[in-house]
Amino acid sequence: MIVPLTDADFDREVRGSAGAWAVLFSSPWCGACGKVAPRFEAVAARCPGGRFGKVDISAHPKVAAGLGVLGIPAIVFFRDGEERGRASGAVSEEEIERGMRGIL
């Protein structure tokens, strides 16, 4: 399951929790985001050891700005609340899986 994250709950949900998180930063107007989202969802469905979230930067820009996310789509990987890696652009399922393996 992919958790929708907002400016209001991001720190509590991701930064304040133990374990692995992959967070997709995207927007409805972004064509490449529409291609990455199903890949992200597919990895989330077969990766029970991690948590997956999504931030719509059009509706919740503070989180992206605070993390220095300058382009979308972007996936930021967190372990125990700390950023551990990033992937950006039209990433493949394999790249997303590799990022998750690095934090699980």
Image: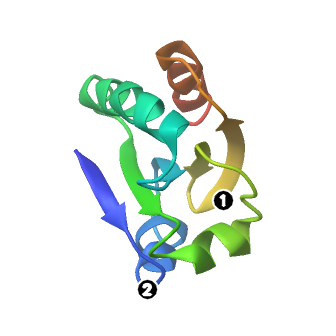
Classify mark 2: residues with Cα within 10 Å, few (<14), some (14-19) or many (20+): few
Q: Secondary structure at mark 1?
A: strand
In x, y percent, where is residue 41? Answer: 31, 33
Q: Secondary structure at mark 2?
A: loop
In x, y percent, where is residue 4? Answer: 32, 62
Q: Is residue 53 something one can see in this rendering?
A: yes
Classify mark 1: residues with Cα within 10 Å, few (<14), some (14-19) or many (20+): some
Q: Nearer the viewer, residue 28 or 8?
A: 28
Identity, as a three-letter code, of the amino acid under mark 2? Ala
Residue in view at x 33 percent, y 29 percent: 38
Q: Nearer the viewer, residue 1 or 90?
A: 90
Query: Left or right: 6 with respect to 62?
Result: left
Residue matched to label 2: 8
Residue matched to label 1: 82
Q: Is residue 104 something one can see in this rendering?
A: no
Query: Which one is in front in this view, the residue at disc 1 or the one at disc 2?
Result: 2
Residue in view at x 44 percent, y 28 percent: 35
In this figure, which colouring scheme has been used for the structure? rainbow
